[in-house]
Amino acid sequence: MVTGASRGLGRALAGGLAAAGYSLVIDARDTSALRRAAQDIQASVPGASVTALAGDVTSPGHRSALQGAAGQLDLLVNNAGTLGAAPLPALTDYPLDELRAAFEANVLAPLALVQLFLPALRERGGAVLNITSDAAIEPYSGWGGYGAVKAALEQASNVLAAEESAIRVWWVDPGDLRTDMHQAAFPGQDISDRPLPETVVPALVRLVEERLPSGRYRAAELVPA
């Protein structure tokens, strides 16, 4: 399962996993974009099994629908999330309602999905892959809100890895990528110098295929030789 798979890194990773032979359940809030992503994956990977369910991962009803669609799960990729307030405000000016919403989408929803699928993941020796950011560990001006929620996700991942020896738990910093979310952080600026999300997919697929130990990784360190 890959959440937030209609565009950006989620879309690219879903395609990479389909090419590696995985049957997919993908979700995103934008119904039309999600449908196009599913069609594109099936067109590029003949025979690929792709189930697309549009919805918001912060909704318990949508999470239950995902559970029903996925059945027995081997891999949960928590990629869906939100940048939060944009343009990026100073932390002292951050609207608290928007910060709460960012924690809901980036921390609580992924944890809720983990809780929902953990029995199946334990049974199958599965894995959880949480997408994080260097903003979780570096003090970038303007990135306090996003950094705080990603830091919380990282620590939750760290503790989950310590508690759950039957599964793999990875949290990965993909690096700066040319995505809509990254563009929203820099309105009006040219971000064409950032690499496309597809460039880090081999690194993430390697992590999954080789079942590397639980822990924090940077995609740049995982790119196959």
Image: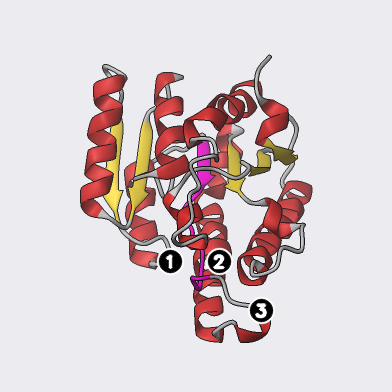
> SS for tag 2?
helix
Q: Which residues are magenta?
A: 75-87
Label whose residue precedes the other's in the sequence (2 or 3): 3
The residue carrying mark 3 is: 91
Q: Are marks 2 and 1 in contact (CB under 8 Å)?
A: yes
Q: Quadrant of the N terminus?
A: top left
> SS for tag 1?
loop
Q: Are marks 2 and 3 in contact (CB under 8 Å)?
A: no
Is residue 140 depicted above or below 131 in this figure? below
Amino acid type, label 2: Leu
Q: Per the image, is 82 magenta?
A: yes
The residue carrying mark 1 is: 58
Left or right, residue 46 beside residue 11: left
Q: Residue 119 bears which disc, if any?
A: none
The residue carrying mark 2 is: 108
Question: In which image quadrant can residue 63 be found?
Answer: bottom left
Horizontal and vertical percent position of residue 106: 54, 62
